[in-house]
Image (cartoon, grey):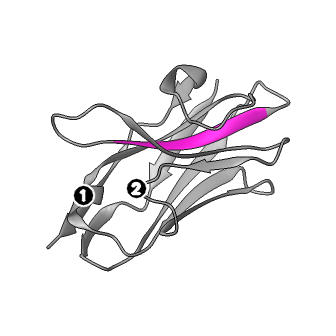
């Protein structure tokens, strides 16, 4: 059974930083992609960043480019999202997700089969 468990959310002031982590287990794919999504109240789920473990591509939403960094530690099967220069527009529930690898320049939710439970990130002004 694939499990994704997020941690690291919380409350931070504008300009601050947070690091989200997602511990993954039970992968059934040899080649896979991992991603971070977020959903703010009243808004659709948005792909923040995604990457492939084999092809090496990494994508970021325009709204987070230059501020957020996704990474994957193969030794611990942990996908992380380093978030810097946070602003109130980044406030949302953040979800990690995993699925089979694909080639593309975006992070569509339908590509991902497994999801974590979500962690709240709140940025105060």
The 10 Å Cα crowd at callout 2, few under 14, some 14 to 19, many 20 or more, is: few
The magenta segment is 32-38
Q: CA distance from mark 2 to mark 1?
A: 9 Å
Name the quarter where the N terminus is drawn: top right
Circle 2 — which element? loop
Q: Residues within 10 Å of mark 1 (few under 14, many from 20)?
A: few
Task: State the residue position of label 2.
Answer: 63
Does residue 14 lie above or below 28 as drawn? below
Image quadrant where one finds the C terminus: bottom left
Q: Residue 87: image x %, image y %?
A: 27, 68
Q: Nearer the viewer, residue 105 or 38?
A: 105
Q: Main secondary structure of the magenta part?
A: strand
- Residue at 17%, 39% in the rendered image: 41
Could you say which quadrant of the image residue 35 lies in? top right
The residue beneath circle 1 is 89
Front residue of 32 and 118: 32
């Amino acid at each position: 059974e694939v499990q994704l468990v997020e941690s690291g959310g919380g409350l931070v002031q504008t300009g601050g930083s947070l690091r989200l982590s997602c511990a993954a287990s039970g992968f059934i794919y040899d080649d896979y992609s991992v991603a971070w999504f977020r959903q703010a109240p009243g808004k659709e789920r948005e792909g923040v960043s995604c990457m492939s473990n084999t092809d090496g591509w990494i994508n970021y939403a325009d709204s987070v480019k230059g501020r957020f960094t996704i990474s994957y530690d193969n030794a611990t099967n942990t996908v992380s999202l380093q978030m810097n220069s946070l602003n109130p527009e980044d406030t949302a529930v953040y979800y990690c997700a995993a699925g089979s690898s694909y080639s593309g320049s975006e992070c569509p939710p339908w590509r991902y089969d497994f999801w974590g439970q979500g962690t709240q990130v709140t940025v105060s002004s």
